Amino acid sequence: MSKRNKKEELIQKEYHKPLIRRRKPNRSVGGDVALYIFLTLMAVIMAFPIVFAVANALKPLDELFKNPPRFLALHPTLHNFSDLFVTMGKSWVTFTRYLFNTIFITAVGTAGHLIFASMGAFVLSKYEFPGSRGFFKIVTTAIMFTGYVTGIPNYILLSKLGWIDTYWAIIIPAFASPMGLFLMKQFMENLPMSLVEAAKIDGASEWKVFSSIVMPNVKPAWMTLIIFSVQGLWNQTASTVIFSEEKKMLPFAMRQIQGGGIARTGQAAAVTVVLMVVPIALFVFSQTQILETMASSGMKD
């Protein structure tokens, strides 16, 4: 056999060798069964409040007061939802106005939060400048303060700016939420600086690097940020900074109905379902994209 044939034979053997040896799972069949049972139980526990809320919204009024209470409705009906919309239709401000206020504030607040948090995180994660570490420490410290602590300072500041009883009283504070900046910075730090430097060598501007290279590679972070921001703004009542009825949000109007007494118990159950539909639908729609992106976007130097 010639040297050339031997070389080709060796290359072929090396080519057909398995690159990674598969490790046999060290769990037994019983362990797998126990794991699946545990996961099923956890899924049932987490789904229970949602199913119970929907079941209550479908119960007629007499079933809501049964003792002992039943989990599912014996005679499901949509009367609670129809009564809710009739009640909302009789209000001084129309249901569509409340809905518009909520959608507008949620959309603008989420978009601004994403843009400002991403731009700030890009600078803090990829550039060193005097005071950058101190500034980030202030951001991490701000996460510990809830809205109840910052409510009075925020109100005084918004009052000085003349934004009380306007949409900006909710939108502007949403832009400055520290959680988004923290989340985006921590994720952007995993992005190799060599990728940014290579783009600059090719002549890309700072905005081009940020919008076309950095943001697509941190999609899991900003998708998660969108979910958190929408959940926070959608459930915002803003009763301390907005006083005009035509500028109030849907949750405020819905919770007024919930406080209407025993006669509105069925409508109150329907309100719970209406308010939780959008955040849950957004999460269900986005979770697949987040998981797929996290599985395929890992990059290391």
Image: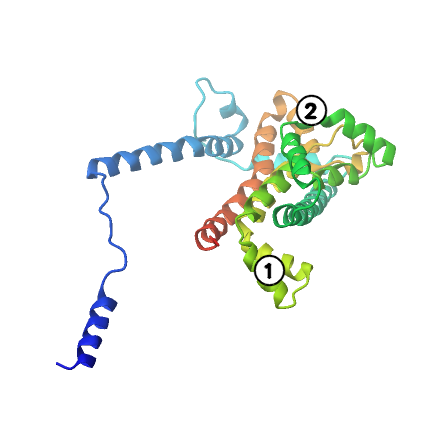
Residue at 65% x, 27% y: name it.
146
* Amino acid tagged 1: Glu
Mark sitting earlier along the chain (2/1): 2
- Compared with 168, 208 (above or below) is below
Q: CA distance from mark 2 to mark 1?
A: 43 Å
State left or right for residue 253 relative to residue 297. right
Residue 46 in the figure: left or right of residue 158? left
Q: Position of residue 243 (x, y in %)?
A: 81, 31
Residue 237 in percent (x, y) is at 70, 32
| Crowdedness near tag 1: few (<14), some (14–19) or many (≥20) residues, C-alpha within 10 Å | few
Query: In this image, 35 relative to 201: left or right?
Result: left
Q: Residue 29: give x, y in percent of width and height.
A: 20, 39
Q: Mark 2, residues whose alpha carbon is within 10 Å: few (<14), some, or many (≥20)?
A: few
Name the front one of labels 2 and 1: 1
Secondary element type, mark 1: helix
Q: Residue at x 65, y 65 (%)?
A: 204
Q: Where 261 falls versus 273 (above or below)?
A: above
Q: Is residue 116 visible?
A: yes
Task: Work out whether 193 lies above or below 277.
Answer: below
Q: Is residue 85 visible?
A: no
Type of residue at label 2? Tyr
How many marks can you see? 2
Residue 199's image quarter? bottom right
Give residue 282's position: percent from left, percent from top: 55, 45
| Colour option used | rainbow
Residue with the most extreme top position: 67
Which residue, given by chain and number where applicable, does mark 1 sit on?
197
- 60 vs 240, nearest the viewer: 240
Residue at the limit of the structure toward the left, as seen here: 1
Badge 2 marks a residue whose secondary structure is helix
Of the pair 239 and 137, the residue shown nearer to us = 137
Question: Which label belongs to residue 148?
Answer: 2
